[in-house]
Amino acid sequence: MPTVAPLDLDGHCVAACWLAGIPHFALADGVIHRLDNGHKWVEAHNGLLAAMPDADGKRLVTGGEDGKVLDIGADGSIEQVAEIGRKWMTSVATGPRGAVAFASGKTAWVKLPDGKLKELVHPRSVEGLAFAPKGMRIAVARYNGATLHFPAADGKPTELQWAGAHTGVTFSPDGNFLVTTMQENALHGWKLADGKHMRMAGYPSKVKSLSWSAKGRWLASSGAPAAVVWPFLTKDGPIGKAPVELGTRGDAMVTAVSFHPTDEIVAIGYADGMVLAGRVADQKEVLLRRAGNGAVTSMAWDAEGRRIALGTETGDCGVIDVAG
């Protein structure tokens, strides 16, 4: 059984991540905790709503109820990215060359690498943001679909329509597909080259966690009593194909998923606090953490794929040493 280093905090963990090899836990009360030669913390926001590490794993970008967007360094340093009045920053995203996006209400803002701030106003509220893996392109999840912008240019955005409320968004690592989570129990996807639709339904509850495999061949998702892992092995992705199901349990829903940084292995967190690892190739499973202490809300592997930072809805955070 792998060893677990616990950190008993008070409150909902919005994001567990690694910055410069140090595990960080961003809680809804606005305090960012880290295990760096002992337990340390920094008070960042008066109420935290969104947090996302950058691709280099050197900083954490956060958005709060105080209208601020902050850059948190691995040493606890805080730099303000933006402050937009008395608005709740409900979504953040990190992009290439230090670009940052954030949203409140119907507006998304993109802070470009040169420091310029671009405002993108939409007819309905912005629910999710994601940068494309290549180029300065951003996707916005909204009611009835998604919108793609090139914020550095003034061209017309691309509208991807699908009826319903879209709550989150992600690009595939090769940039060929866009997938949204929905208010209904489903995912929806588009093949960007030709706009083909990918209907990914059949979930018993809402999908709140997504994770791509390192080479983008698989997309793992929560929202069922197993991790539902969709195949993106061909140019048409999962169109007409069934997903693989890992870690099926009869009595607990999957609430968080995280793919290993190099291998096709998924860490699977459940509503009862249990964590399993499942391998896509043969569906082999290993128990990493026993049940208890609230639903797993966030997980992240370290760069070496040896440890997993995890947080729960009750503030029971920690590091699983898989090699231990």
Image: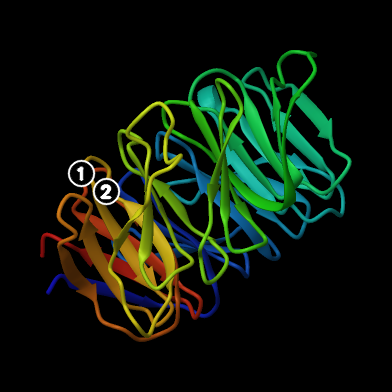
The x, y position of residue 143, in whole percent, is 78, 48
Q: Residue at x 71, y 64 (%)?
A: 46
Distance in Å between CA atoms under marks 2 and 1: 5 Å
Give the labeled residue for mark 1. Answer: 263
* Label 2 crowd (10 A; few <14 / some 14-19 / many >=20): many
Q: Residue at x 44, y 30 (%)?
A: 236
The x, y position of residue 262, in whole percent, is 23, 40
Q: Is residue 152 above or below residue 306?
A: above
Judged left or right of residue 254, residue 194 is: right
Location of residue 110 (image quadrant): top right
Q: Amino acid at mark 2?
A: His
Q: Residue at x 37, y 85 (%)?
A: 251
* Label 1 crowd (10 A; few <14 / some 14-19 / many >=20): few
Judged left or right of residue 55, residue 102 is: right
Give the labeled residue for mark 2. Answer: 260
The x, y position of residue 118, in whole percent, is 78, 26
Location of residue 49 (image quadrant): bottom right
Residue 219 shows in this picture? yes
Between residue 277 and residue 62, name the one nearer to us. Answer: 277
Q: Is residue 51 above or below residue 292?
A: above
Tags 2 and 1 in contact by the CB under 8 Å rule? yes
Q: Amino acid at mark 1?
A: Asp
